[in-house]
Amino acid sequence: MRILLFVVCVIITTVHAFAPATTNHHLTQATLSTPLLNAPDLLMKSNLLTKTALCMSVEGDFDPDAIAKARSDAQAGSIKARLRALYKFTRPHTIRGTILASIAGTTRALIDTPGAIQNANWGFMLPRALIGMLALLLGNAFIVGINQIFDKDIDLLNKPFLPVASGEMTKRFAWIVVALSGLVGPLLVYQNFPSLLFKLYAMGIVLGGIYSVPPIRTKRNPILAGLTIATVRGFLLNFGIYYAVKDAVGASFSWSPKVAFIARFMTIFATVIAVTKDLPDIEGDKAFEIETFATKVGVPRIAKGATFCLLANYLQAVANGALARSGTFNSLAMIGGHGTLACMLIWRYRQFDPESTGSIKRYYKHIWDLFYLEYALYTLI
């Protein structure tokens, strides 16, 4: 029990450590209400968009003055500014998800393996765990980095605070970071983990790459985009971590009820994230003819549908806990925990205003918050 409480504290601390401070600037949203422009017009007016659009994300709020200062500091050679740009380049909210998945998956695998904690060779396992997490973070950096390179023009409207779009990071340096991440990550996995994990990791890298890179660019198709994100962040990540830890302690892999549950639950959750991530970007996606469910169906319906899907996901978790054989799950965490998160989801949705850009982005951020909290529950179920 002490180990579980420690892990939950680490997870909560990690979320807060990476949580950005938000600013309280009152800025105009005039550009969001202007008629849609074609791509050349947007490129010509990128400076104007950067100065006038209020753009928020799960990383926080960034006003035009802050963007201009960050760009100026980075171009002036400030080490601190360049490190901050590199941090933003890795998309912190995705880093949090990767780190929490690593901590929770490792903890779950150790708890599920009798004697693993008491007899663990920590001198071998800890370095290997750190190498595994580093490889995952490099894979994460590759996927989100290559997306920023190919989406620079769209990000000028949707996310001008991102370092490639804002000018804090040159495309040349972005390519260097992406290339190194795409080479070092697979090499670490190849040298330190079983061949199956290397194949799964390579599959994730390829799927994450073709999501953004022409001519395939699966992000243009909402179904393929959703399947890509659900596969990588839902199934591959959670299965891969559990399998790696089992291999490290010398135990054979088996689909325990808990790991089967989290793989299924997080795949559905990642699918919802894949759909709702486009809600704040609807203007830019329309302008550059990126077809998403949000552009086709509209923000209110997507938000309602996403909330319904997540609520159904929580209800099936509660049902799983209630109907499973005695001892399969921790009933308090499985039933009470998921019931509490379901109530949080409903409460947040009742505050949602589809006509407010800020409300849309807060809604998306809250979905990620629930995603993080699920990993805390995973260690307890």
Image (cartoon, grey):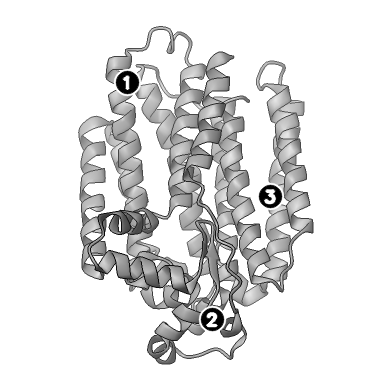
Q: Callout 1, which amino acid?
A: Met
| Distance in Å between CA atoms under marks 3 and 1 | 35 Å
Q: Secondary structure at mark 3?
A: helix
Q: Is residue 268 visible?
A: no
Q: Residues within 10 Å of mark 3 (few under 14, many from 20)?
A: many
Q: Is residue 249 left or right of residue 254?
A: left
In the rendered structure, the answer to whether residue 190 lies left or right of residue 353 reads: left
Q: Whole-percent x and y of residue 376?
A: 58, 32
Residue 169 position, x and y percent, is: 29, 66
For the N terminus, the image quarter is top right
Disc on the earlier residue, 2 or 1: 1
Q: Are marks 3 and 1 in contact (CB under 8 Å)?
A: no
Callout 3, which amino acid? Leu
- Name the residue at 61% across, 58% down: 364
Mark 2 to mark 3 CA distance (whole Å): 26 Å
Q: Residues within 10 Å of mark 2 (few under 14, many from 20)?
A: some
Instruction: Provide the residue designation for mark 2.
Output: 286
Residues 112 and 11: in front is: 11
* Earlier-in-chain disc, 2 versus 3: 2
Left or right: residue 204 versus residue 31 is left
Residue drawn 28% across the image and 25% down it: 127
**Residue 352 placed where, x, y %?**
74, 62
Quickly name the residue at label 1.
125
| Picture disc at residue 310 | 3
